[in-house]
Image (cartoon, rainbow, N blue to C red):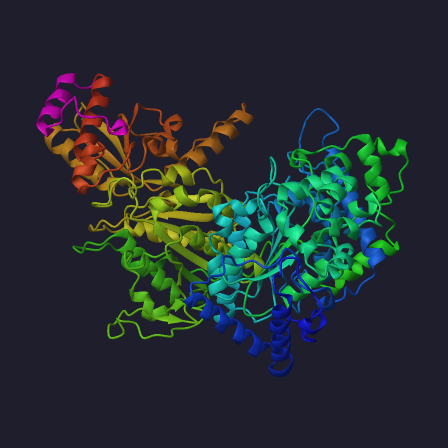
């Protein structure tokens, strides 16, 4: 609503579809009077009440969209304050160097690829931000956080090249990283830890990460851990990318939490990888309805300034009508086919429109610009967004994919474009005033003006006014005081006769850390919606559940000790039934050391089956992000979760965790193992500041826990230690012996099998607790590689080899996970090696029945040991047959992996 009263200016307007112009005028006059006399608030109230009455009469508005024009009227646009000539010049330099970077990477036969069209469409969107809005961290300001769209990376490198942050040699090694001089294809903090802040090219992950980044920023501000500055989280996205479930899945959270520190910029170039995003519809209108319905402030930047005079002359709404009628497939064709085609097919449909452009040339019609390429329109939108309060903002900016690339402009194959033909290259050069001859174009030179040139001086001045260069990433932050292992002394000494689960032990250990000075206030407990399942409800009252609005109701359990308490300063992040959201929140907290210079210790606890399997792409991104924190897979294991069945029983999360190179994973059986692992993780991540994160599985099975054996700490950390040593006979003929390896809850079955072997078969067993087959494999591979590269040196031994070097007998391993998990260490086991595991779909039953079904209980461990000894010639095969009969195991039992 214009403050001057837009309706007074428009009273002479008639509409092409108006059946009673006089009545329409009366309505407009009455409404204009209300605006003038009572103000826009009163006018809005009347509109809302009128809508209510219409609803009661069965008349409903069918959509949430506004007309297909810019949200901000020209008269309301904040004026762009800088030197337009200089900014266009810098933008041209960035465009050229981005193009040259990709094309030079493909001059030979390596076919490295790259993307030209995405940045070509978004250059103005980034340029205006770089010049006026993206604030870098400084002593005065924490800085904005910018999620750059992955396919636009060449343009960001090109801007950094002009700043002097990236060298020509690095540009020449775009997508050539192995020798250490190159640039990653996309934003990767792992590969450029001082430059890129966020990995975004796995499409859809940027939007949900940005939402939860803004959410965590508010959380930290409300807890008074960081100051309340006007920091913003910017996310640059593609319109095709918005089809990813993660892109839209958390919009309501942002609206509900009123995250006015969040700005989405959706580059609506109307094309995805293979063709139109919505050839038969309008993606801008569709997204407007989705965002508006989720409570966002929506700013559409559809048309550039050259359309303003035509829209001003559109007194009957015919131009707006035509804009509404056309679908995105047609808009793509208009830009592909030129001005004459647009005159005939767009303006030519109605005589009034054809007459409107009669005095315009075809070139002038073709030059009618889209809003996302107009810096004046983009600046006005950004200015409105950063000054809007109470809502997150989305800017829907219409652009052209492959803008200004000649033959590559607005064509379906634009996304795959990595080279321009010579004529298109000449046109690009001429359009952006690059000082190269046709002959020089053959070498695709970069162009960086002299250090003291007006362009570079202006660029540096603009960035200096905003605090410095972006993107930029902080690698290190303050070190946190890490408690000694003695903090968990109660768990190191064993539980006596008391039975408890490792899940309950973890909750108590976390509570102990929370009470520790210097680190306790940095602990962030995160759950999706299972706190009671994990025994964490006691923390509701103690720590409070974070809520930006506090608690506006009295909970029904207010009279109980552990009532449901929400608080603006609450510590627990309970994200609802939303694993992807909770994981994104954990990632934001786990990178707070970099984004806020404030290391946090996030503990995200979840059903292990709904961890890596459901959010594997986010877990990979967490590795790239250099996240630091703990993931706790509770109710873990294929046979540990009573009664739940196929979709809840996890037998493969450790296999999935092994695919993330800097994810350190453990499957502890006993509380003291968990204590050692937690303390070591705190040391590595928060004192040594290693860029790793931990995945630890926890069980809900209650049992007694022994005291920690002396000297076990090193083995627990490395992944394997001797838990029980079999008896050593002084007789001339040593008793038969096996090595039994157990992990997680199946370790207790292995211990029981050792007793059976001794008591019933006179076979001794050394029992090893394996806390991490993944870590054992990694260390084994590293040693194996060292030996290969040092053929004349004395070979090294990995930890598995050292542990088993002086031990006799075949080796049997059993875990609650797929056989491939324990099978990873086979190359380092020099004796016959047999693996038991839980391949196949889960079942709903008791633990005992499940372990029988998956063949990992004590009887099957015993059978595996006997068979291994028989294979080695130390037992008669009939002994194994007798054991099968004794245990009631049928040789025709169904194979669980295929059941």
Residue 391 locus on image (x, y percent): 54, 66
Residue 620 locus on image (x, y percent): 49, 43
Q: Residue at x 48, y 73 (%)?
A: 49
Q: Which residues are magenta?
A: 874-899
Q: Is residue 730 a member of the stretch shown in magenta? A: no
Q: As displayed, is residue 640 above or below residue 134?
A: above
Q: Is residue 310 left or right of residue 824?
A: right
Q: Nearer the viewer, residue 42 or 176?
A: 42
Farthest residue, direction left: 886
Q: Is residue 204 left or right of residue 574?
A: right
Q: Residue at x 37, y 37 (%)?
A: 773
Residue 233 locus on image (x, y percent): 59, 60
Q: As displayed, is residue 505 above or below residue 406?
A: below
Residue 402 appears in the picture as rendered: no
Q: Quadrant of the C terminus?
A: top left
Q: Nearer the viewer, residue 518 or 501?
A: 501
- The image quarter containing residue 345 is top right
Q: Is residue 449 left or right of residue 890?
A: right
- The image quarter containing residue 792 is top right
- The image quarter containing residue 771 is top left
Residue 763 locus on image (x, y percent): 17, 29
Q: Quadrant of the N terminus?
A: bottom right
Q: Nearer the viewer, residue 849 or 298?
A: 298
Give the number of marks: 0
Farthest residue, direction bottom: 37
Residue 136 appears in the picture as rendered: yes
Q: Is residue 489 left or right of residue 25?
A: left
């Amino acid at each position: 609503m214009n403050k001057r009263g837009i309706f007074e200016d428009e009273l002479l307007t008639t509409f092409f579809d108006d059946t009673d112009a006089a009545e329409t005028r009366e309505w407009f006059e009455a409404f204009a009077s209300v605006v003038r006399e009572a103000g826009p608030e009163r006018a809005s109230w009347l509109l809302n009440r009128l809508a209510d009455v219409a609803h009661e009469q069965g008349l409903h508005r069918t959509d949430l969209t506004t007309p297909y024009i810019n949200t901000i009227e020209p008269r309301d646009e904040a004026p762009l304050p800088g030197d337009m000539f200089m900014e266009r010049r810098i933008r041209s330099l960035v465009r050229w160097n981005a193009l040259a970077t990709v094309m030079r990477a493909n001059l030979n036969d390596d076919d490295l690829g790259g993307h030209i069209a995405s940045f070509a469409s978004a250059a103005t969107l980034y340029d205006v931000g770089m010049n006026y809005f993206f604030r870098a961290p400084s002593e005065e300001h924490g800085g904005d956080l910018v999620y750059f769209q992955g396919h636009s990376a060449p343009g960001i490198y090109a801007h950094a090249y002009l700043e002097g942050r990236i060298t020509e040699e690095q540009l020449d090694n775009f997508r050539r990283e192995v020798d250490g001089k190159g640039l990653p294809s996309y934003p990767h903090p792992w590969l450029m830890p001082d430059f890129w802040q966020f990995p975004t090219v796995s499409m859809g992950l940027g939007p949900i990460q940005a939402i939860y980044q803004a959410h965590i920023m508010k959380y930290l501000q409300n807890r008074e851990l960081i100051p309340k500055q006007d920091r913003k989280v910017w996310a640059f996205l593609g319109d095709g990318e918005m089809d990813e479930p993660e892109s839209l899945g958390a919009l309501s959270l942002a609206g509900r939490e009123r995250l006015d520190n969040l700005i989405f910029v959706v580059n609506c170039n109307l094309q995805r990888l293979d063709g139109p995003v919505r050839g038969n519809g309008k993606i801008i209108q569709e997204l407007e309805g989705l965002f508006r319905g989720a409570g966002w402030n929506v700013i559409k930047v559809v048309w550039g300034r050259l359309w303003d005079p035509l829209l001003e002359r559109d007194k009957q709404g015919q131009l707006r009508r035509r804009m509404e009628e056309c679908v995105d497939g047609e808009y793509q064709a208009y830009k592909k086919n030129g001005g004459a085609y647009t005159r005939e097919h767009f303006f030519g449909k109605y005589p009034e429109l054809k007459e409107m452009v009669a005095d315009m040339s075809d070139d002038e019609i073709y030059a009618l610009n889209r809003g996302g390429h107009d810096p004046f329109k983009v600046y006005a939108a950004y200015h409105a967004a950063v000054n809007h309060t109470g809502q997150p903002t989305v800017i829907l900016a219409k652009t052209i994919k492959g803008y200004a690339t000649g033959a590559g402009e607005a064509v379906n194959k634009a996304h795959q474009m990595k080279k321009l033909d010579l004529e298109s290259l000449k046109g690009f050069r001429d359009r952006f005033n690059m000082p190269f001859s046709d002959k020089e174009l053959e070498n695709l030179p970069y162009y960086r003006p002299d250090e003291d040139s007006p362009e570079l001086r202006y660029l540096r001045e603009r960035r200096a006014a905003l605090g410095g260069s972006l993107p930029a990433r902080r690698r290190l932050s303050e070190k946190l005081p890490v408690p000694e292992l003695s903090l968990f002394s109660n768990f190191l000494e064993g539980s006596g006769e008391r039975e408890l689960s490792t899940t309950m032990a973890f909750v108590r250990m976390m509570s102990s850390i929370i009470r520790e000075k210097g680190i306790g206030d940095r602990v962030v407990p995160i759950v999706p919606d299972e706190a009671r399942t994990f025994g964490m409800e006691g923390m509701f009252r103690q720590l409070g559940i974070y809520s930006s609005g506090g608690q506006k109701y009295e909970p029904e359990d207010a009279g109980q000790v552990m009532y449901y308490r929400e608080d603006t300063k609450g510590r627990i992040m309970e994200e609802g039934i939303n694993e992807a959201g909770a994981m994104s929140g954990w990632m934001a907290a786990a990178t707070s050391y970099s984004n806020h210079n404030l290391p946090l210790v996030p503990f995200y606890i979840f059903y292990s089956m709904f961890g890596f399997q459901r959010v594997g792409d986010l877990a990979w991104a967490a590795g790239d992000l250099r996240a630091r924190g703990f993931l706790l897979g509770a109710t873990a294991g294929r046979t540990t979760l009573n009664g739940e069945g196929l979709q809840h029983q996890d037998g493969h999360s450790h296999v999935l965790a092994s695919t993330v190179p800097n994810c350190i994973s453990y499957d502890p059986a006993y509380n003291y193992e968990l204590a050692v692992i937690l303390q070591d993780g705190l040391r590595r991540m928060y004192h040594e500041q290693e860029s790793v994160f931990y995945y630890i599985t926890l069980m809900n099975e209650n049992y007694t826990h022994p005291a920690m054996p002396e000297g076990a700490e090193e083995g627990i950390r490395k992944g394997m230690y001797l838990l029980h040593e079999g008896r050593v006979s002084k007789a001339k003929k040593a008793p038969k012996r096996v090595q039994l390896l157990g992990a997680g809850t199946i370790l207790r079955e292995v211990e029981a099998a050792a007793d059976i072997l001794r008591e019933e078969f006179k076979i001794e067993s050394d029992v090893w607790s394996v806390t991490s087959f993944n870590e054992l494999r990694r260390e084994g591979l590293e040693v194996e590689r060292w030996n290969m590269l040092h053929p004349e040196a004395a070979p090294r031994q990995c930890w598995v080899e050292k542990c088993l070097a002086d031990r006799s007998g075949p080796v049997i391993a059993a875990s609650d996970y797929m056989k491939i998990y324990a099978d990873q260490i086979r190359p380092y086991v020099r004796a016959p090696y047999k693996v038991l595991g839980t391949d196949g779909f889960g079942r709903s039953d008791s633990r005992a029945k499940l372990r029988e079904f998956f063949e990992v209980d004590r009887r099957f461990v015993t059978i595996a040991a006997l068979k291994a000894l028989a294979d080695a010639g130390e037992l008669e095969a009939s002994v194994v047959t007798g054991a099968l009969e004794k245990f009631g195991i049928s040789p025709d039992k169904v194979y669980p992996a295929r059941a």
